[in-house]
Amino acid sequence: MKVLKFGGTSAGSAARIQKIGEIVGKEMPALIVLSAMSGTTDQLLEITNLFRDGKSGQALRRIALLQAHYEKVVNELFPQGDSETVSYVKDVFKQLKERIEQGDFKPEDEYFILSFGERLSSWFLYKHLVQQEIETVLLDATRLIRLKENGEVDMEDLRERLNRQLGEHPKARVFVTQGFICSDFQGKIANLGRGGSDYSATLFGAAMEAEVIQIWTDIDGVQNNDPRIVNQTRPVRQLHFDEAAELAYFGAKILHPQCVLPAQKKGIPVLLKNTLQPADPGTTVSESEMGTGFKAVAARDNITAIRIKSSRMLNAYGFLKQVFEVFDHYKTPIDMITTSEVAVSLTIDNTKYLNQIIDRLTAFGKVEVEGNKTIVAVVGHVDPDNPGYAMRLFSALSDVPIRMISYGASRHNISFLINTTDKKETLTALHAGLFE
């Protein structure tokens, strides 16, 4: 069985849901994982924020507007009428209104409100497939994916629950469920974070040991650069799991950073496809190594660089351990790190505790902080014995001020820290120097 995940733009209208139905009809048997229709999660988040701020009247007006939009989708998707879907939509928005009208916002209300985006889209596709006379079962993701107390997914529980549900419906050709949403260790509604539908899909795929996991968006696979900035990008047809993970972490929008690992652990290929161009081969992510060389460039903004200069580093052991313990204490991940005899430079993208971190680091030496930085990652399979690859990179970037360079931890990634104001010039220069 295959797993097919469709993003918000792929399910963004009645016509798009019908298009999904056509694709599913050619890929059965399959488990379908759906995101909320495009724009819905943002609107539900706005409703949540209004509720949190005590603006219940405004929240209720937003709910009424969203309900009118979904009623329009129902009429377009089911022109002959579907009383069950009409009742379902009314019930969803009745629950939302009742939650707002109760007053007294509670933290769990956000998870409850946000969950309805995926519930609505999955219901629409389920009913559409049933009308197409395809044997289809709707599954509730909150009863499948559960988080442990530490926030990690309980894979053994998921494997048992999912395979039991699949086994209870031997005649079904399609199972439809929601991405993003899950339950916490207490059984309350939770979610996997924004972009978590990709993660849901690979979790389901790993749990059922699917033959392939297909991620459907509105892009022809992974592009070799950011098409919003660089002209004439092209899709990368083959990526190793490690290459895809690096691209996802450093800003490629087609993949969620967490989604690669479950598939990689089980050796399940991930196929990235375009809903609007289903005949396009897309990008395949697998354990296969397809030659050496540079494959793609990605960029991550909102980076802060921190430099600690201290003579205590000279011929000393334990210095870096003390520095890292500061970031560990404030649960702040480090992206890049470089060292010299008397200084260490590193980058972070979470500045929530920046002031406290700086206060602690001043005990070790002089601390300098620079914001508005971008990490540019050049991803591929770099042969360290090839003497020519570095020259190509530095020749391409000869006119760009580079603040830090990181290479050696992975043969799949060479990273540069630059000023964000130089981002467009950097991506364009790398594209010309490496791919044209």
Image (cartoon, helix red, strand yellow):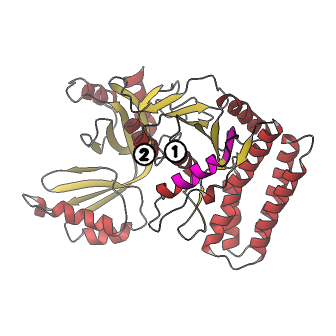
To which residue does mark 2 refer? 261
Image point (19%, 60%), residue name:
320
Q: Are marks 1 and 2 in contact (CB under 8 Å)?
A: yes
Kind of residue sitting beneath label 2: Leu
Based on the displayed image, in which of its 4 quarters is residue 332 positioned? Answer: bottom left
Element at label 2: helix
Image point (21%, 71%), residue name:
363
In-front residue for pair 299/423: 299
Kind of residue sitting beneath label 1: Thr
- Residue 157, placed above or below residue 294: below
- Residue 346, placed above or below residue 264: below
* Magenta-drawn stretch contains 388: no
Residue 431 point in image, percent of width and height? 42, 27
Residue 163 point in image, percent of width and height? 57, 49
Quadrant in the picture for the N terminus? top right
The boundaries of the magenta stretch are: 159-176
Q: In the rendered view, does 160 fall on the left or right side of 302?
A: right
To which residue does mark 1 refer? 202
Q: Disc 1 versus disc 2: distance between alpha carbons?
A: 8 Å
Q: Earlier in the sequence, mark 1 or mark 2?
A: 1
